[in-house]
Each structure stands twice: as C-alpha cells, then as structure tokens.
Amino acid sequence: MIIAVDGPAASGKGTLAAALARHYGLPHLDTGLLYRAVGRAIEAYSDAPDFEARAIAAAGAVDTGHLDPAILSAQPYGELASRVAVIGAVRQALFDFQRQFALQPGGAVLDGRDIGTKICPEADVKLFIDADSKARMERRARQYEARGLTVNRYELYHQIEARDARDRANPNGGFFPAPDAHLLDTTRLDIEAAFRAAVALVDGAMARKAGPSGAS
C-alpha cells in the first residue's frame, strides 16, 4: 500500500504521515528533508551567482542515509529548500530515490508537495493536508519555541505566505492536490483528531479499492 501525503508547510502532513506509517506498519519518507539537505549543503552560497549549479550538484550527492530531522528542521533550511525546489534538475536528481522508496515491497508512506501528482500518481491513497496560514504559523512558532528559539510571529507568518506563493508558482512541482486526493483541513483539529480523520480516509479508500468482495 502506497500512501501519498501532500500539503503546504506546517499543515501537519509530516506528523500525520509518520503516524500513519506507524499505524499501518509501513516505512516513511519525509521528502522535504531531501530538499532541506540540499539547501543545507549550499547554505554558504545562498547569494552566489552559481547558486543553481551548486544546488544541482548537491542534489546529485545528497546522502539519503543521513537525513537528520533534528538538524534539517531548522528554519533557514526550510527557506533554502523552497528555493532549490523550483530548480527542475534538482527535482529530477531526487526523483529516482523517492520512486524507489515508494515502490519497495509492501509499500510506504511519503509526504511532501508533489507525491500524489509527480512521484506516485498511482498511489493507493492520496491525502492533501491543509490549514489556514495563521494556524500553520502558530504551529511552526510553537515548534521553534519548544527548541528554545525566539520567534517573531509577524515575520514567520509572512515567510509562510511567501513560501506558499513560491510553491504555487513552481513549474516543476505539484503544490496543488491531485484530482483524486482526499482533502483534510486540519485548521481546527488537534493531532489526535486529525490522525483519526486521516485513518478513516485511508481505510475508506482501501475498502472501496478492495470492492464488495474484499478482493484486492
């Protein structure tokens, strides 16, 4: 079973994807960490004229075995990830690894921006997780504060809005939900309620896929 979980930053997609993976006993890949790893590799060159070329080279050399969320979840890497993600050659360099992960025996759960539209258009279940910008800002702010960081909420809100705009304009990635994706708005849901709703969507989709006889 392949479950594709897409959505904008801080919508809760990563937390839900990890919980779904545990629930169904499937491996999980946060594909955003791949782009963050590329961004981290070229952080010193963020204003360099050859930024794009360096990003492409870094994508080809990213160490997929050492994607540490504790390091890569830092705010600067999220901004850099958004910048490198608009580079077509970067996305192509990371495509094969994501496909191989998804197609491993037994299936997998992947979360990102374009899983249901680009990486796994044949996924058994596609979820698109969303929430309004204010709710997403507050969640991200609490994450940073839990790490002891000082947060400017006004600035963070506008960073999220700017990233949404950049992602929507990205010609190389599917920010929008796949036509057959199940939409889940988590604006007013805590994580437990969101998880229950996601499981219900997955179970329902798989039941419909099996048909009345229960055959796959």
Image: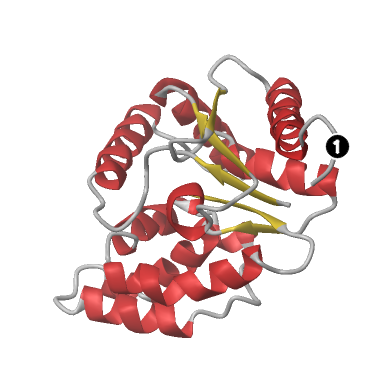
Residue 17 is drawn in which quadrant?
A: top right
Residue 34 is left or right of residue 216, and the answer is: left
Residue 24 is left or right of residue 179, and the answer is: right
Residue sitting farthest toward the top: 188
Observer-nearest of 56 and 108: 108
Residue 91 position, x and y percent, is 38, 67
Residue 201 position, x and y percent, is 68, 28
Residue 33 in view in this figure: yes
Residue 113 in view in this figure: no
From what the image shows, is residue 124 above or below residue 80?
A: above
From what the image shows, is residue 93 above or below residue 47?
A: below
Residue count near mark 1 (Cα–Cα under 10 Å), binned few <14, some 14–19, many ≥20: few
| Residue visible at 28% across and 59% down in the picture | 86
Element under disc 1: loop
Observer-nearest of 175 and 132: 175
| Residue visible at 55% across and 74% down in the picture | 97
Residue 205 is drawn in which quadrant?
A: top right
* Number of numbered callouts drawn: 1
Observer-nearest of 187 and 140: 187
Residue 88 position, x and y percent, is 28, 68
Residue 138 is left or right of residue 125, and the answer is: left
- Which residue position holds label 1? 214
From what the image shows, is residue 83 above or below residue 190?
A: below
| Residue visible at 35% across and 84% down in the picture | 57
Residue 153 is left or right of residue 193, and the answer is: left
Residue 54 position, x and y percent, is 29, 81
User: What's under tag 1, amino acid-wise?
Assistant: Gly
Residue sitting farthest toward the left: 49
| Residue visible at 44% across and 40% down in the picture | 178
